[in-house]
Amino acid sequence: MWMTRRMTLQFLASIGKIFDHLTGTEAQPTEQRQAVNEFRRESAMSTANFNQPYEEEGLVPFPADGPMLVKKLNVAALKTGGVQLTLTGNGPDGVRLNLGEKELHAVVHMLSQTAEKAQWALGAHLTKSTGVSVAGPAKPRVVN
């Protein structure tokens, strides 16, 4: 799959509202929502294993006509509490990902890292309300 800079920016800019819905904090003050989302993101990232190598043995890397350019991304809430991301290209078929909150945090993290490596400078376009950091590691917080 290919995602353009514009599609990635739109997805990352809307992810804050998606996480607010997942955590049930839509009605809370902004600072409280950000604190809850940051805590849940850190919790999800502490249990994620990004060091496991990708095993591609036996898998076809791309369809015969090449990787799919994502032209539309839909997000739908699942009754189980997660979300379903549907990524579609030119054809009617697409990729559906049913993700819980922790998996969604991991996808956002990987997408943010990829955008940073590509030097897309998305951090300048994203506000603090998104809860997404693409500018590198956060400064350590000191509690007095």
Image (cartoon, helix red, strand yellow):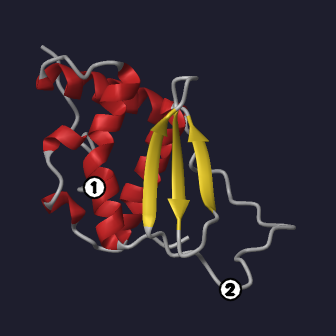
Task: State the residue at coordinates (17%, 24%).
Answer: 142
Disc 2 residue type (three-letter): Asp
Between disc 1 and disc 2, whose residue precedes? 2
| Gap in angstroms between the C-alphas marked 1 and 2 | 32 Å
The picture places residue 5, in percent across and down from the top left corner, at: 32, 71
Which residue occupies the foreground of this view, 82 or 113? 82
Residue shown at 34% from the left, 54% from the top: 11
The numbered dot on residue 134 is 1
User: Quadrant of residue 21 in the image?
Assistant: top left
Measured from the top left, where is residue 40 in percent x and y?
A: 38, 26
**Element carrying mark 1:** loop
Question: Would you identify the image quadrant in which residue 80 lies?
Answer: top right
Give whichever of 89, 134 is nearer the camera: 89
- Residue with the mark numbered 2: 65
Residue sitting at x 34%, y 18%: 24
Q: Is residue 25 visible?
A: yes
| Placement of 76 over or under 66, stated as above or below | above
The reply to whether residue 133 is in sight is: no
Farthest residue, direction bottom: 65
Q: Nearer the viewer, residue 115 or 47?
A: 115
The residue type indicated by label 1 comes to Val
Residue 39 position in % (x across, y down)? 33, 24
Identity of the residue furthest to the right in this view = 58
Q: Is residue 118 left or right of residue 62?
A: left
In this picture, residue 127 sits left or right of residue 37? left
Q: Quadrant of the C terminus?
A: top left
